[in-house]
Amino acid sequence: MSEAADAIAFENVTLALGGRAVLAGVSFAIRAREFVGMLGPNGAGKTTLMRAVLGLLRPQNGVIRVLGRPSTHGNPAIGYMPQIRSRVAGLRLSGWDFVAATWRGHRLGLPHLGRDGRREVAWALEMVGAQDLAHRPLAETSGGEQQRLLLAQALIGRPRLLLLDEPLISLDPHRQREVVALARSLQTELGIAVLFSAHEINPLLGAIDRVLYLGQGQAALGTVDEVITGPVLSRLYGAPIEVVRLGGRIFVMSDGHDMERDMHRHDTAHAGCHDPSHEIHHA
Amino acid sequence: MLDYDFMRHAFAAAGIVAVVGGLVGYFLVLRAQTFAGHALAHVGFTGATGAVLVGISPLAGLVLLTVAAGIGMGFLGERLAERDVAIGIVLAFSLGLGLLFLHFFTAYAAQATALLFGNVLAVSGWTVWTLLGLGIVTIAGLAVISRPLLFASLQPELAEAKGVSLRLYGVLFLALVALATAECAEIVGVLLVFALMVGPPATAQGLTSKLGSGLLLSVLIALAEAWLGITLAYYTDWPSSFWITTLSAAAYLATRPKISFARA
């Protein structure tokens, strides 16, 4: 496998979920060692796209290549931080055991770590600066601290591609910046590719190399200046969109409403499960 | 006290079951599936009474039907939102069905209390050997799947992405829970399996956040509660199940202040 192989390459990929086409004939390529922010309205297919990269969902059409090979289920080269994390908050188990469960977790037998495993868990905790959290029960850690432990968990097995599904949800702006900075430093230090999904472009500005924007079954990949524009986003939202830049921040507006911000608010309230078309109409 | 055969049998049976319940229960509490365990015990009541009706041993009926129900529950377990309601309905129906079987076999009514509330002092030597065999199978099964089971319990989405079949381990685990439940029911009865399968692991998880110590502590607490309960029953002549459930609740409540304090 060559060093230059793209981290994720979609060739004319169609992904369907429950009979509905989430992505229709999409092509793009995320390079190795690239930090890409993934944005798009709810239901645009951000989680679905990650599940397809993980081999959990087969494309109806087209080819997905991950690190130069066709996507397969259980690919050890991919680290993944899933979005559903409510379970974690109530656990009485320590952060160490939580992260350690990932070490060769698919093998049968007793959950014994061994020296290699202990070293790997210690390394992952150190990479995210969570050594001090490791011996506290998860139930007694904050949202930001849990996020670090989840990141450590994603690093177990030394992946070359990291998929982070909405790591910023329910964090305050200060913690959001910390998580983005941490993800960026991991990406640079480990020389890996990171796909980081989020609701809003602003926390990611300055950290990401490129942005992958999803909407209306389509995708646009490019620099922030290339993608976050009125014409491109109007196509992806299927509605006239205006992009306003103000004081180093970007506002995606439709009819005078800030689309990304609206979505974020709704999402925190409803835990991310509602109809994206609704957003467009009331906006 | 240990001069009597029935007391030696009681201690041996309760010891075996406490170890099994403490270990399986730890994962049950971790996976937040305690209600499923409770329901499986009720299905066991139907199995035991049904077995008597068709002329086989109640323990065999108990084991067969709980394991079948555990596997069935595991296959249906995907629809999380519906689970509580579905389990509740199955639970009530099982008890109702068990009652009907008892109705057809009225001479057996005295044994109904033993099935529902347990009677560890009536355990025979043969039953102890059966429990030992079942216990070894259950613990061996748990040992084989414990690693992927733990991964799937703590981070199902990530485990699935890494190639762990959530459904397979969900089904296998509930089958083990069913076996453990059937064994616990022999000691404390189908209505009170919580005392051995949920009380000790929940108490242990309140005391330590380490996985290894948690499992060990869960077993030790279950053993202490079971044996102390039988001893108290011997000296007071009150039912052993009463003492075991009381100790289980007391130990859990005694560790609660630590939990609420830590959360505050």
Image: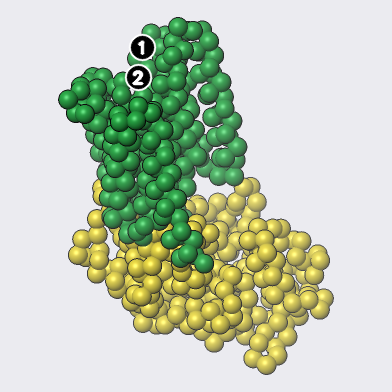
Q: Horizontal placement of B144 versus A52: left or right?
A: left
Name the image colouring: by chain
x, y percent for residue A218: 64, 65
Q: Horizontal placement of B232 versus A61: left or right?
A: left
Q: Quadrant of residue A42?
A: bottom right
In the picture, which chain is yellow?
A: A
The residue located at (49%, 71%) in the rendering is A142
Residue that protrudes farthest toward the front in the picture: B236
The image shows a total of numbered marks equal to 2
Q: Residues within 10 Å of mark 2 (few under 14, many from 20)?
A: some
Q: CA distance from mark 1 to mark 2?
A: 7 Å
Q: Amino acid at mark 1?
A: Ile
Q: Amino acid at mark 2?
A: Ala
Residue pointed to by mark 1: B56
Q: Horizontal placement of A170 versus B257: left or right?
A: right
* Badge 1 vs badge 2, beta-carbon distance below 8 Å: yes
Residue pointed to by mark 2: B60
x, y percent for residue B238: 38, 28
Residue B165 visible somewhere in the drawing: no
x, y percent for residue B85: 60, 37
- Tag 2, which chain? B
| Quarter occupied by the N terminus of chain A | bottom left
| SS class, disc 2 | helix
The residue located at (46%, 12%) in the rendering is B109
* Nearer to the camera, B213 or A1: B213
The residue located at (36%, 60%) in the rendering is B209
Look at chain B in the picture and name its colour: green
The residue located at (66%, 71%) in the rendering is A264
Q: Horizontal placement of A258 versus A105: left or right?
A: right
| SS class, disc 1 | loop
Residue B84 visible somewhere in the drawing: yes
